[in-house]
Image (tube, rainbow, N blue to C red):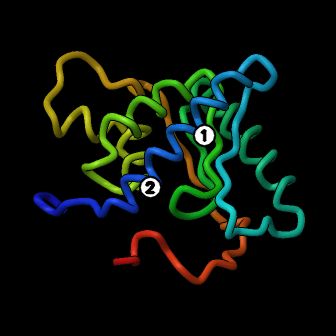
Amino acid sequence: ALGRRVKPSVVQQTLDLAGVFAVAEGLAEQSELLLAAEDDWLLCPHGLLAILHLVRTASALDPRWIALRCSYGFNGIVLRAADVPSLREHLAAHSTRRPPDHLVYEWFSGEWHRKARLPGLPYAAGRSYRAYRHNVWYHIGHVSTLSQP
């Protein structure tokens, strides 16, 4: 929400994610796609096949898609390796403003660009983001960084 300060633990989580994406940038030549997965989620049986189906279907509908979702929060987000630097920069630049799962949404939807009334087009302009109709992950976590004091 506007005017509320993001807790230091959440800022750190966002910066940690930006750091992970910085490492992933170095792997971009080895893979076209990246799957963001949190450590307190388990992939459901046949989940990888469902994700592959999502990638193929989304690519047939929009070869330039920017993000695919098959879970909640920052889990289960499929990204193109070429887009990782832009997301990393967005997370690092805005870590004190919103939690990371909110920042990733505003990045792939272009929401921040519109709200901030920035000139030009957002990075995601003309590219779709899609969500799979099922969550293919099972959450085993009990403690959220967001709910900690």
Q: Amino acid at mark 1?
A: Val
Local SS, label 1 = helix
Residue for point 16% across, 63% down: 4
Give the answer, above or below, for where 144 lies relative to 95: below
Quarter of the image with the N terminus is bottom left
Q: Residues within 10 Å of mark 2 (few under 14, many from 20)?
A: some
Numbered mark located on residue 70 in the image: none
Q: Residues within 10 Å of mark 1 (few under 14, many from 20)?
A: few
Q: Nearer the viewer, mark 1 or mark 2?
A: 1
The residue to which callout 1 is attached is 20
x and y, in percent, of residue 77 in the image? 61, 49
The residue to which callout 2 is attached is 101
x and y, in percent, of residue 69 in the image? 59, 52
Give the answer, above or below, for where 82 lies relative to 116: above
Residue for point 59% across, 83% down: 142
The mark tally for this picture is 2
